Image: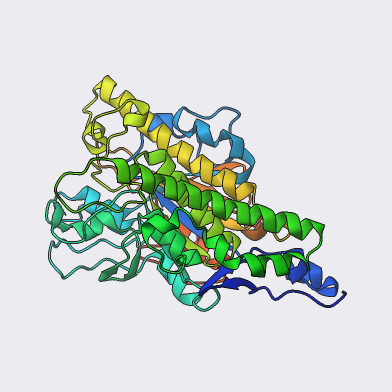
Amino acid sequence: MPGKSLRRRTLLKGMGTAIALPLLDSMIPAFTRAAATKAPCRMAMLYVPNGIIMNEWMPPMPEGVSPLPAEFPRVSAALAPFRDEMMMLGGLTQNGGRALGDGPGDHGRAGANYLTCVHPKKTNGRDLHSGISVDQIAAKRLEGKTRFASLELGCEEGVQGGSCDNGYSCAYSNSISWRTPSSPMPAEIRPRAVFERLFGAPNEDPRAARYEKSILDLVTADAQRLDSKLGGADKRKLDEYLFSIRDLEKRIESAERNNAKTARPSMAAPPSSIPTEFSEHARIMSDLLTLAFQTDSTRVVTVLLALEQSPRAYPEIGIPEAHHGLTHHQGDKEKIEKVTQINCFHAKQFAYLLEKLRSTPDGDGTLLDHSMITYGSGLSDGNAHDHANLPTVLAGRGCGALKPGRCVRYPKETPMGNLYVAMLDRMGVPVESLGDSTGELGYLSDIG
């Protein structure tokens, strides 16, 4: 009926569970559809550690603005299908990641400095001090607009105490999100925990019973009542959404089952819903991020794909050595090749997320149209611990505020903080400065 609609915050309810819904046509009154389809802008930051083999990452990029090339280098080749929906940025620097008189500790500084743009205090004690990260500035200002101010996701577990890098606390290496200068936001690496935060637990069933009951079983009656009120397009959208929830649930359950069958030493068992393979772990987290954006559960997400000084090996791609050790290659061609393969593997996980966002309808476009997604590292050359010219991708259209499809190389030593100031402005969260920023980064849109 004209002028009647479902509430945007309509939930499927049942047995103590409530599941948020994506934006449906039925939530938009007929006479206000054009205005109401304006989607909120989201931001996500993905971090990879230990730098990237730069000559395999960045296409030839003269200073200034130029079109993205027809062919991408080897590491960034996985991103070629998104040429028209991303920018590659060069020349950005995190000066706060450098020693600045504090000696060794580039990995600890790289992680803590990446989103705060502040040189962290060298300490392995409780007197941590970095800065408030860009994601938490946005989360604080947007608080109340969504169920969760932000989500902090990860694919490798770290510890928050002790020293991890030449006198720098492990908290610096293991968190890129900082709520206050002394309060890091550790990443959640357990898919089950994130899923239940978004959708609730199935009535506190024992784990064995979880495999027999879906979270959707608890809201079946409400879903059927809602379905009877929807038009054809909304019925399909609801079916696809519920299918994606159940598919993700099955993949988490599969990881739990597989881990339950694995022989364990006589020690505390690790979180059981973490897939053995890195790629499946990263993709489940990407699916959870997509669902969080799709249901407007949050508009701010960080993803720590791996930790600085990561000891992770990648047997999936035939690399049994630890990532961090390989990056200190000192020109060894065999080690450089293995790091390049790891870099390619990470980029493929980012490409998976971009495809999920691009294929998910959202209002008058897609989630990728209405998002700003960064991907990069706090180091460029991991062997040299270089904090200049950092590998940086900015994907999405930011609700029309970005003009993708271009390379932009800024003058040397341009602060990374300038990018974050520009992103916050496009999120409706204007700030004068962030860390060592010197202004708002230009050339991200038609008007500069």
**Picture layout, residue 48 above or below residue 194:** above
* Figure quadrant of the C terminus: bottom right
State the image quarter where residue 140 is shown: bottom left
- Number of labels in the image equals 0
Instruction: Point out residue 241 in the picture as x, y percentages from the top left corner.
Output: 63, 56
Out of 158 and 245, give the one closest to the viewer: 245
State the image quarter where residue 311 is shown: top left
Residue at the image point whose x is 48% and y is 76% from the top: 141
Q: Residue furthest top?
A: 333
Residue at the image point whose x is 13% and y is 59% from the top: 162
Q: Is residue 95 left or right of residue 137?
A: left
Out of 203 and 188, give the one closest to the viewer: 203
* Figure quadrant of the N terminus: bottom right
**Colouring of the image:** rainbow
State the image quarter where residue 132 is shown: bottom left
**Picture layout, residue 60 above or below residue 275:** above
**Picture layout, residue 121 above or below residue 5:** above
Instruction: Point out residue 397 in the picture as x, y percentages from the top left corner.
Output: 62, 53
Q: Is residue 76 left or right of residue 369?
A: left
Residue 184 in sight in this render: yes
Instruction: Point out residue 334 in the picture as x, y percentages from the top left corner.
Output: 27, 20
Out of 354 and 263, give the one closest to the viewer: 263
**Picture layout, residue 242 above or below residue 375:** below
Residue at the image point whose x is 41% and y is 65% from the top: 205
Out of 18 and 372, give the one closest to the viewer: 18
Instruction: Point out residue 339 in the picture as x, y percentages from the top left corner.
Output: 32, 30
Residue at the image point whose x is 59% and y is 67% from the top: 219
Residue 49 in sight in this render: no
